[in-house]
Structure formats: structure tokens, C-alpha cells
Image (cartoon, grey):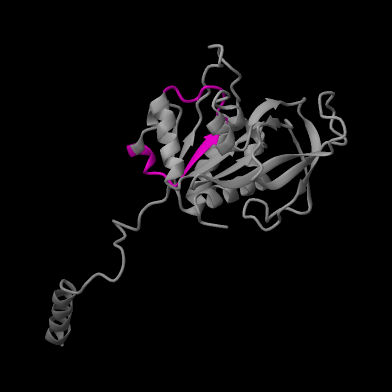
Amino acid sequence: MNRMIVVPCLMLATVAMFLPCCGPSPALGAEEKRVLVYTRNGPTLAGKKGFVHDNIASSVEAIKKLGTENGFAVDVSDDPKVFTDANLKKYKALIFSNTNNEALETEEQKAALQKYVRGGGGIVGIHSACAMMRNWPWFWQLMGGTFIYHPKFQPFTIKVLDRKHPSTAHLGETWEWADEFYFLKEMPKDLHILLEGDLTKLDDKRKPAGEKSRPLAWCHEFEGGRCWFTALGHKKEQYSDPNLMKHILGGIQWAMGEKK
């Protein structure tokens, strides 16, 4: 009996050594999906230190959690030297989380970002990312505009214009939210607006007369790449809010080309 059991097992083991592999080895796996979260707050155009959000650490931890739960690796840096052609090739998306002012330092770094986008890369902008690189028109067009100002932090109503997009499909027709209501300029006409904020009850003396709403989140394809932006997310506590995190997750997945 022992011989009958042992001999077939040895034969199977021998044959298995020569069988072709039918799938990826767990040790090797498929090509890993990876994103870079970039958080640098550079100096202002006048060379002074600008405002730095205290939400950055919370946003980073929240995005890491999204990665763990949804199958993508997350690298984090505030060093502009990561913007090289060779390094950016590793990433399915670059996430600018609350970056501000001159977050890139050299023309070579700017060229690497342009090459990444033109090669089909994904871009995600969160909150003050629209206030980054305020003297670079190309970046304004990529991000969907450049920051002008915001009134005081306050509650307002958001109208959900696209309830099928992966970043907004979990929301109802309206969303009650409190935040800094961002106003931008130089917004390109091809933006697909996802969320629009109601201005009618907003406490803001500077808001344009007669204007009833303003975009707060959008996406578009740009020079071969994809960019998704949300103006929401001022407070660090908000990065544990399920609605905001589903919103950001959908934006990341869209920017990576995983969802339409």
C-alpha cells in the first residue's frame, strides 16, 4: 500500500516541474498599481512661506487606507526631486494632496510632469492643489483653474450634477457639506463638472453678483492624460468622512483609467 501511494506522488511532483505556469506566481504577481501622493507646500511667488494645511497627514493616511482596501500601493513625498521621467513612470496617478504655491522648483521638474501627463498619466488634485504653481498657465489648464480666494469656512449645499461618475455615484441629488468654498479663475471650457456649490445662501461679500452656483469638483482629459479635482477637504477630520473618501477614491480610480 505504501509503495502505491508514494510512487504516484513522486511521479506527479516530477511532472509538475516541467508543466508550464498557468498564471502569475504569488511571489511575482501582476504589475503593481502604484500612486504617488505629493504634499509639498512651496514658497509664494514673493519667496515667502505660504499657508500650510494641517490636514496633510490625515489625507495621506486616508489615501493609504484607500490603497490597502482597493488594491493600489501608495508612495508619499514632499520632495520635488521625485519629478523625473524615470521615477514618474512607476505611477498610475499622481495625487496632489493640499499642495500649495511653488511646489515644483525647476524647469526640469515641470517638464517631467508635462511628459507624464502627455504619456497618459493620471492626475488627482485635492483642495488647495488648485493654488499650486500660480504663475504657470499650463498647470492651471491641467488642474482646471487657479485659486482666487475663499470666504470663511461654512456650511453650504452642493448639487450633484453627475450621479454616474465613480466619484459621485454614491451621493444623492444634493450634499450638505461645510468647507472653504473655493473660487477659481482661468477655468478651461472642456471641464466635466461633477459637483456645483450653491451660492445663494453663501456668506460671502465678494461673490459675483447674480451668480447662483460655482463648480467644486470636475474632471477632464488633457493632452493625453486625465485630471480629476475636488475643492473639498479643508479640515483634517473630514478625511474620515465616508462620503468624502468615496468621492476621492472614485477620482483616483477614474484618473488611473480603471473606471469611467
Relative to 155, 144 lies left or right: left
Q: Decide if residue 24 is in sight here.
A: yes
Q: What residue appears at the point 84 percent right and 32 percent down from the top-left corner?
A: 202
Q: In the visual, does 26 lie left or right of 41?
A: left
Q: Residue at x 74, y 32 (%)?
A: 181
Say which quarter of the image contains residue 6. Answer: bottom left
Residue at x-position 53% and y-position 35%: 96
Placement of 147 over or under 6, stated as above or below: above
Answer yes or no: is residue 74 visible.
no
Residue 166 appears in which quarter of the rendering?
bottom right
| Horizontal relation, residue 173 to residue 125: left or right | right
Q: Position of residue 73 (x, y in %)?
A: 43, 46
Give the residue drawn at x 81%, y 24%.
206
Q: Nearer the viewer, residue 202 or 54?
A: 202
Main SS, magenta region, reads loop
Magenta range is: 86-106
Residue 244 position (above or below residue 99): below
Query: Residue 254's spot in the image, x, y percent?
Result: 55, 52
Q: Position of residue 44 (x, y in %)?
A: 56, 16
Could you say where residue 94 lies in the image, as x and y percent from the top left? 48, 40
Number of numbered discs present?
Answer: 0
**Which part of the image, by quadrant, shows the C terminus?**
bottom right
Does 160 appear in magenta? no
Q: Is residue 87 magenta?
A: yes
Is 228 in front, or is 16?
228
